Amino acid sequence: MAFMFVRTESAFAYNRLFQVCQDRCLEFFNGSLCPRFGSMDHSRPIANGFRRILPEIKLLNCWPHLHRKAREKKGLLVEKESYEENIKTQLEYLSQARSASQFEALCALVVDNWITLGEVEYAQWLETEYLTEPWDLWFYSASDAPGVVPNQNPIESHHRKIKATAVSHLRAATGHVLAGTLPKILIASAMDIGTEPIRHFASGPVHSDLLTTALLLCKDDNHHPKHKGKSPRELSNIDRYFFNADPYVVRDDNALGVKVDGFRTRTYKGSLEGVLRRNETVENIPLKYLSLHAVKVMAQFPVRHDWDSPSWSVHEIERIRNKYKCDCKEFYQTGWLCAHILATLHLVDSLDLKMMLRNFPARKPPGRPRKKTRCLDRDGTRKSQYSVNALVKRLTEKPASVINWSILTVQTSSDEEGEETQRNYIGKIKPPFMRGGKWHWDIEYEELEAAPPMQIEELARTINYSFQMGHNLVPN
């Protein structure tokens, strides 16, 4: 709460503030104040004060503050539309960087792209103000410490609450604020002596949605490496697991799902060390460098959970933090919990996610119940009717009901460097025929040669994929 009492943006004020904090800590607690991190807005007086009084501190720059400043600086752009079309999105890409080396490589790629587009002045502003030390630590994993994120908003909100509830006026004089807040805060702190220490995480239950996502990530298409066919010794040597980021998770209702394989993980792993592919473009950043998350295995000891307790204890959480480390935003915000960590616990420590889901109490959905449909009312197209299970049932019972439907089929090819390209081709379903006691369907393609006929399961998945892509299935 020390920042709350500095009313002047000057080097003298902050130097005095940090020195007083140092002296009082030594006087009252007989110890030195050695914070690892300092959270700040883009302010030279704050940065200089930190560096002068606390030279070993790591300064984190507030990402929301940068986001606001980037919008205010649109006047530097030659084409004002470039901010919404390119710059805003690409800045968000940079804020999601998984490591310092990846951040530097992506920044160089993005800045070069802006210069190529003619936005030289805006690119120079970003490089000068937010890509040079000490202003360059604003991506969410910049601290490299789970539970510490470059965001000043929670601190400012906390200070605002103290002022609003403890004094009669929000913008009161410093002396009035001190007289109205410090005694109450000190008394409240004295009453809580002996309670649990302040940590970067909190114990508690795991949400059911997080468990469901973790179960999905445990499927072979959504993680790498796989355990199948590996000996116990090989499994113990795995030091990192790669999982799909949420937009790319392979599931029936996600047309953007991409299988996690060795090529994607090698490209991603190289970027974490600052190595991008040759002649890279900014359009490839989301899929190649931000579509995965890596969970690092830092130690080899078992992690167990008490199934009788729905919550995770502090001891269990500390063991997780000492064994695993994820590079996702949720892990850094909570300090220990994300779907990727739960999936790794399932793969490595045999954590029974299904049992945890079964132990959740059943709850009614929020809100008012849906109004009953009248007999003559008709809903629009429902996703459920194009789910794989519904389509399998339809093709089994009425195999001729999909004749002349238009579908999309994906064909994958690789270039000389091993990079895969996926192309969609339009095809028309022909009448079914029986072979070996099973239904088959030929597909007539516009730009492809004849392909082997599809069986029920394959055709159901193809129709489902076409629907998710927004393709018009039924002929007019």
Image: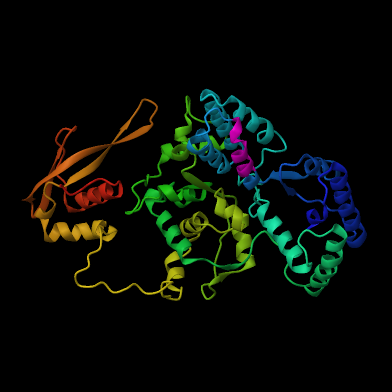
Q: Position of residue 457 (x, y in %)?
A: 21, 53
Q: Which residues are magenta?
A: 66-76
Magenta stretch encompasses residue 236: no
Using the rendered image of the protein, determine whether residue 243 is visible from the camera's viewpoint: yes
**Relative to residue 173, is residue 77 depicted above or below?**
above
Could you tell me which residue is drawn at 18 percent across and 44 percent down? 406
Using the rendered image of the protein, determine whether residue 238 is visible from the camera's viewpoint: no
Magenta stretch encompasses residue 74: yes
Residue 105, image quadrant: top right
Could you tell me which residue is drawn at 46 percent across and 39 percent down? 286
Residue 100, image quadrant: top right
Describe the colour scheme in one phrase: rainbow
User: Residue 96 versus residue 352: which sits nearer the camera?
Assistant: 96
Quarter of the picture holding the N terminus: bottom right
Q: Position of residue 161 (x, y in %)?
A: 71, 64
**Relative to residue 176, is residue 267 depicted above or below?**
above
Q: Position of residue 336 (x, y in %)?
A: 59, 58
Farthest right residue in view: 27
**Relative to residue 26, is residue 275 depicted above or below?**
above
- Main secondary structure of the magenta stretch: helix
Could you tell me which residue is drawn at 15 percent across and 41 percent down? 452
Q: Position of residue 285 (x, y in %)?
A: 48, 36
Q: Is residue 224 left or right of residue 191?
A: left
